[in-house]
Amino acid sequence: MLAKEDLAKYPFLQKAAAFIEGRNLSISDLAGPEFSNVVRRAVERVRSSILGEEVTTETSDPETEILSYPLALAFVYASKITWLVNRFATSEAKRCEEELRKEPISKLEEIGNASFGWKVEANPISLEWEKLDFRLGVWQYLEVAPQFHSVSWKLTNKYLNGGHVYLKAKDFARLLAENLKLRIVRRASEEEIRKFDLPQLLMPHLEGLLKLAEERKGTFEEEAPQGLVDGAIPPCIQAIMGDLASGKSVSHMARFAITTFMINVGEGVEDVLRRFGNVADFDEGKARYQVEHIAGMSGSRTKYSPPKCDVLRSFGLCVNPDRTCSRVTHPLRYYRLRLKDQRRNGGVAQGAKGGGGRGSA
Ligand code: SF4
């Protein structure tokens, strides 16, 4: 049974929408003094997304948390700033994914069935190489999965049976969260939302958020998207990926370079660990600790950047440099340039190399 705390964590639940409708409140009503906590929390959610801070769920007062979500969305939509919508959608999706990953399988199944009209079954099967926890219809999977750039999400890399896709619990959590993100973003282009204006009483809060958004805009535009994009990965990183895929044990610097690179382009800890899965001396516990430390999730809370090209070169890790390499001094700069090229060309960047092995420097 889903409780109020669950509605606070997962605003995409049909019950969460019903709870809000049941209160019969308009956005203007939320400007009243009795809802000052709701306004504070809504502003905080949007602020955190602008600043790139982690948004966690506040379950101590579930009602405030539930009501703050539509108000935060109202601020974001009223801003009419596309990147802010994307940013907010991403931070809410991350928050939900974190929560979903803590849920037991039975609860995750219940959430899956009570959200986007999906038919989800906890149907554990053990394949030779992995254990899968859920199955859902192929078409439902395809509503969301094409958003992911990693090849592991391609239908051809998934176990299919009887019109269903089978997934691990953590992948299912990611799929649900990504669907939330998609829905937030897509709703922004609907006529009703495009015409939406915030009630005058709430405008001072929106103005504060717009000011902050303006200050942060430049930083955001320079940031990389979520996840690895094929064709934008620099040759040095591709070479390390190739080595890891073939089970070679790579140097400490190579491990640091690929981990920091992946984390900085928005890949998760699990995605990074999966890259190391073929290496003979792979110790998951130790590797997880190191990756989480590099991602700033533990220890000093500092997120590390990949080394510059100069450093990689001095360690013999600058291999098969291409034309784009001559324009950059940092692998992340390479990645951003290639992404820009891709956008300009409307597809895969020209001259991209495959994810192959090591060549000569
Ligand atoms: S020049 Fe830089 S980005 Fe290009 S392969 Fe060498 S280290 Fe990587």
Image (cartoon, grey):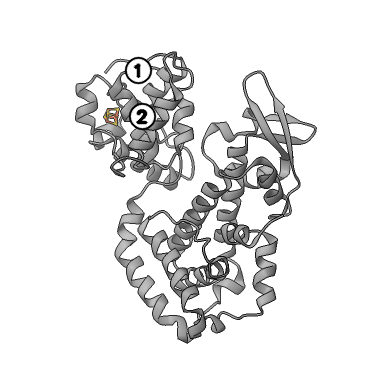
Q: Quadrant of the N terminus?
A: bottom right
Along the horizontal axis of the image, is 165 left or right of 46?
A: right
Name the mark on residue 103. none
Residue 228 visible in image: no
User: What residue sits 68% from the left and 51% below the top?
Assistant: 111
Query: Quarter of the image containing the C terminus?
Result: top left
Label 2 with label 1: CB-CB less than 8 Å: yes
Q: Determine whether 18 is above or below 235 in the image.
A: below
Amino acid at circle 1: Val
Q: Can residue 77 be seen from the camera position used here? A: yes
Is residue 298 shown above or below 245?
Answer: below
Residue at horizontal 71 percent and vertical 31 percent from the top: 124
Tag 2: amino acid: Ile
Q: Looking at the image, is 357 positioned above or below residue 348?
A: above
Circle 1 residue: 250
Residue labelled 1 has its Cβ within 8 Å of some atom of ligand 1: no
Marked residue nearer the N-terminal end (2 or 1) = 1
Q: Who is closer to the viewer here, 108 or 26? A: 108
Q: Which residue lies furthest to the front in this view?
A: 60
Among the 4 quarters of the image, the one containing residue 332: top left
The image's mark for residue 258 is: 2
- For mark 2, give the secondary structure: helix
Q: Element at badge 1?
A: loop
Residue 83 locus on image (x, y percent):
43, 60
Q: Measuring 48% from the left and 62% from the top, which residue is drawn there? A: 85
- The percent coordinates of residue 302 (x first, y second) are 29, 43
Please provide percent x and percent y for residue 77.
51, 70
Q: In which quarter of the image is residue 159?
A: top right
Binning the other alpha carbons within 10 Å of mark 2 as few (below 14), some (14 to 19) or many (20 upward) gives many
From the top left corner, tell me how far across and down residue 198 is, in percent: 50, 80
